[in-house]
């Protein structure tokens, strides 16, 4: 279960109810969860406990899909996909594997996103965008001049701003999904102590120190 309460269909919240109709049909998302892509759908029901946050994040989805966007959709999806992978969000990564196929990225490019630096399936523009994504997510915006120059060689200022905004937005979505245990990110932390065989940790460390 998510770490926060959820809110389903409510009188007076016509906007959220309209979105729920699109995602869940005539089902109650709390009693009968599940979206067409296979997710539980609790991203939406958790955000709906603060209706303004629900509307704000939904507007963000509309922003990046708006026909007025100048950034190439396949490049945009590379950034979103890589951001989800780097943050470690199974939800964001999984959803944008599907979205990447929808905008024409090859299976090699989708799978290669995990190890793009040694993959040979990307052109110079895509590699510049992936390097920039790593600087945004891993280095928190500490972008080397060489990386930015490579990006500027392929994208306009408007494209770079859109790419930056969308990629950083999805870094936030990935972080929130993990923190709140939403959708596919309701998982135990994989970093756990593994018990030492044949004795407790103090005994083992004493042997190592001898």
Image (cartoon, helix red, strand yellow):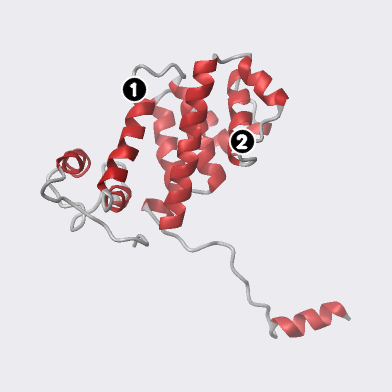
Query: Residue at 42% across / 29% down in the picture?
Result: 101
Spatial CA distance of label 1 from label 2 is 25 Å
Above or below: residue 171 compared with residue 62: below
Q: Which residue is mark 2?
A: 141
145 sits to left or right of 29: right
Q: Residues within 10 Å of mark 1 (few under 14, many from 20)?
A: few
Q: Position of residue 155 (x, y in %)?
A: 56, 15
User: Mark 1 or mark 2: which comes first in sequence?
Assistant: 1
164 sits to left or right of 124: left
Q: Nearer the viewer, residue 117 or 73?
A: 73
* Secondary structure category for the residue under label 1: loop
Query: Residue at 22% across / 41% down in the picture?
Result: 23
User: Where does the N terminus fall, quadrant-wise?
Assistant: bottom left
- Quadrant of residue 132 in the image? top right
180 sits to left or right of 75: left
Give the label, 1 or 2, closer to the camera: 2
Above or below: residue 207 compared with residue 139: below
Q: Which residue is mark 1?
A: 66
- Quadrant of residue 156 in the image? top right
């Amino acid at each position: 279960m998510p770490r926060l309460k959820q809110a389903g269909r409510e009188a007076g919240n016509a906007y959220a109810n309209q979105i729920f109709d699109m995602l869940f049909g005539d089902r109650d998302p709390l009693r009968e969860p599940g979206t067409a892509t296979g997710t539980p759908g609790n991203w939406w029901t958790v955000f709906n406990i603060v209706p303004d946050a629900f509307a704000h994040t939904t507007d963000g989805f509309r922003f990046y899909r708006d026909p007025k966007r100048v950034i190439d959709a396949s490049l945009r999806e590379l950034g979103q996909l890589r951001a989800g992978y780097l943050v470690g969000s199974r939800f964001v990564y999984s959803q944008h594997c599907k979205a990447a196929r929808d905008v024409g990225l090859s299976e090699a490019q989708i799978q290669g996103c995990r190890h793009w630096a040694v993959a040979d399936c990307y052109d110079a523009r895509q590699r510049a965008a992936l390097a920039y994504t790593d600087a945004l997510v891993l280095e928190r915006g500490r972008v080397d001049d060489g990386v930015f120059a490579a990006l500027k060689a392929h994208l306009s200022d408007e494209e770079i701003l859109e790419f930056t905004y969308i990629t950083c937005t999805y870094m936030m979505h990935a972080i929130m999904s993990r923190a709140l245990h939403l959708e596919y990110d309701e998982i135990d932390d994989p970093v756990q102590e593994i018990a030492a065989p044949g004795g407790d940790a103090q005994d083992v460390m004493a042997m190592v120190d001898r």
